[in-house]
Image (tube, rainbow, N blue to C red):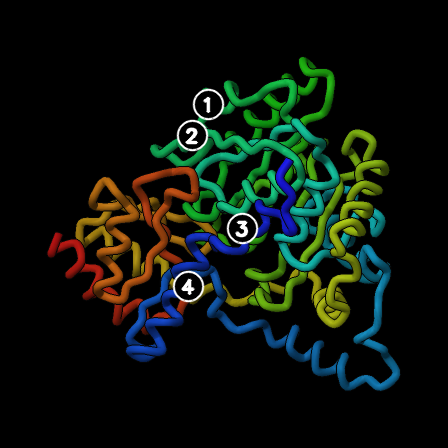
Amino acid sequence: MEYSSINKINCQLGTERSVIREIFEYGNMRASQVGRENVFDFSLGNPAVRTPKCIDDSIVRLVSDSNFNVHGYTSAQGAFEVRRSIAKSISDRFSVNAAADDIYVTCGAAASLTITLNALCNSGDRVIAFAPYFPEYKVFSNGAGAEFESVEADTEKFQINFDGFEKALTPNTKAVIVNSPNNPSGAVLTEKTIIRMCEMLREYSKRFKHPIYIISDEPYRELVYDGIDVAYIPKYYDDTIVCYSYSKSLSLAGERIGYIFVSPKVNNAKEVYAAICGAGRKLGFVCAPALMQYAISENPGCVCDISQYKLNRDLLYGALTEYGYSCVHPDGAFYLFVKSPVADAVRFCELAKKYDLLLVPSDSFGCKGYMRVSYCVDTDMIRRALPLFKKLIDNL
């Protein structure tokens, strides 16, 4: 075997950034050339809505309290009082049993997913996700030693392609990642879809004689519009682990704070929780930022004002469909999934760059032929960008 001074896989990941990040960095470069106001960057899911005042007030009070060491270490899995506050909020909101020792506080959703996958997976295990999916799911799964498989998208209703799902289930299937509201489509899985998925997983868990876990990735849970309800999967399926982030619901993306909830109904729940703690230790994801832990624990149920996102959605969806674009109508999150007017979405997004419109092609989401438009931006930028969207499609 040839000697290498570095891990080649990690070197490749560090050299070739995700498509989303590449476009974001391209936007930074263009902004330095033509001015930030002349670049219409719809690439990154970076919240534009202000963090709620109650969170800001808590942070100010916490750092001003000379009797409280807000910058010190907490327990590896998070301060007990913080985990107790999160558990109580889960119990109160969703009528499920949750206790402090079911919660592991993390550095955002990426840490939640990475820890959970490393806790569950052994070499040869398989992890399934439904296209379109967040591209890093594959990176996280492979990094945990598992094989990653995507189920072809249901491009009619953006629910679950159950024929494809059933074909993907094998005795090596360890977990299924569910993301609702979905990044990149904004679709919310209906209760009917959730029930059918859970029934299928119970059947195959029994057939394979081992649990198949649902990993419910929920950074967009609170970002829903028009009274849409998001089913809480632990109420429907026992072997569920929730990976949550406050990045979107509280506009705290840069502060990296979230949690893992291991449902007490999970098969061997205490052992699974111990594996979560062990994976956090192995990966170095211990003691999430203390200041953010205390700030979120003081404000259970707090959510940022998402009315701007709804305004942006309605404005962008209405205009683009009027111009001739075909779009998935998003019930949640803050992304518009737009059918590329030409077969090759990568080529179309390159054409859009001529107008300094930065859009993300959908190939890396496991669903070719679309583009993701992130509308968690200033509304004025959308208004200024609309004539460019029209020129782009008119000039094809």
Q: Which mark is nearer the camera, 3 or 4?
A: 3
List the residue tagged with mark 2: 152
Looking at the image, is mark 4 or mark 1 earlier in the sequence? 4
Which residue is label 1 attached to? 164
Q: As shown in the figure, which amino acid type bears the numbered disc 2?
A: Glu
Identify the residue at the far top of this view: 207
Q: Nearest to the eye among marks 1 and 3: give it.
A: 3
First-in-chain label (2 vs 4): 4
The numbered dot on residue 24 is 4
Relative side of 199 to 224, left or right: right
Name the residue that disc number 3 marks.
13
Mark 1 residue element: helix
User: Which residue is at the front of the view, 158 or 77?
Assistant: 77
Alpha carbon distance from label 2 to label 1:
6 Å
- Compared to 32, does 315 lie above or below? above
Q: Where is residue 47 in the image (x, y as percent from the top left)?
A: 49, 66
Q: In which quarter of the image is residue 314?
A: bottom left
Please rate how many residues cluster around mark 2, counting C-alpha atoms within 10 Å: few if below 14, some from 14 to 19, many from 20: some
Q: Which of marks 2 and 1 is nearer the N terminus?
A: 2
Pointer 2 and pointer 1: residues touching (CB < 8 Å)? Answer: yes
**Residue 316 location (% of width, % of height):** 30, 59
Question: Which badge, 2 or 3, comes first in the chain's sequence?
Answer: 3
Q: Residue furthest front?
A: 2
